[in-house]
Image: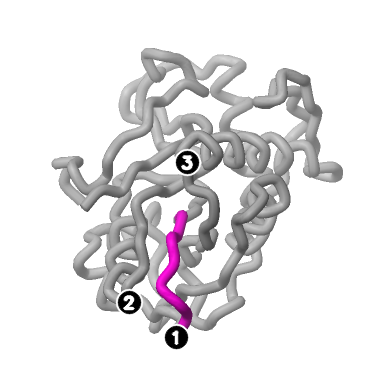
Amino acid sequence: MTLQLHVHGGYPSYANSGASWRGVDHDAHMLVQTLKGNAINGYVTMKGSDGNWHKFTTEKPEAAFHIFGSWAASVIASLGVPRSRLVAVPSSSCVELGGDPKGRKLIDTIARYAQGHAALDALHWNEVMKKAHAGGERDPDTLYGHLYVLDPFAPSTIILVDDVVTTGGHLLACARALRAFGHTVEHAIAAAQTVWEHPPNGMFSIPSRDLEADTKAF
């Protein structure tokens, strides 16, 4: 099995490494916060995959979603997958289908830019989960036991979508839960990957990686 993770950029977490915060780090942080629906200070001007510069603020976040959605659509086009269901990793409080408006907005955004790819609410938890960054579970086998999958729907090619990925445990759990129902899940798209130091290739040039082959502990 493979689960290739494609990320738009990094999500800086430099407290332990002591790495300095640069302008690009603040921009990357505020992009993710905007996609999460959180307020940011001031504004960000960022170059999109279309080659144009786009400005977003708390009051006018549309450009942030354009940047993410158009980038994600370009990644999907490069995969050679003509049709798929876009399924969000449920937030920790999502205990029913349709109970995660943040995740739904991300998959709806991608679907607007990626023709042939449809957003679908297909996953939720069986109880409210503790947030991962607050010490919640990251082990995919444990998380798997807490997931409910929409059933039935015809076996489909599914692309998972998340806002921030750290270990990848939640993505792996979701992929395995969907595969158990006969779906094909080989790719995941995220707005950001947590980074503890300055990425060597640049904040917005983080290589794709196979989460199934990653030996990192959860």
Q: Residues within 10 Å of mark 1 (few under 14, many from 20)?
A: few
> Residue at label 3?
80
| Residue at x 43% of width, y 85% of height | 151
Q: Is residue 198 left or right of residue 8?
A: left
In the depicted view, which residue is nearer to us: 4 or 83? 83
Q: Is residue 30 left or right of residue 130?
A: right
| Residue at x 60% of width, y 56% of height | 117
Label 2 vs 1, first from the N-terminus: 1
Q: Nearer the viewer, mark 2 or mark 3?
A: 3
Q: Nearer the viewer, mark 3 or mark 1?
A: 3
> Residue at label 1?
152
Q: Amino acid at mark 3?
A: Gly
Q: Amino acid at mark 1?
A: Pro
Circle 1 SS class: loop
**Which of the numbered marks, if any, corresponds to residue 181?**
2
Up-down relation of residue 22 to residue 17 (above or below)? above
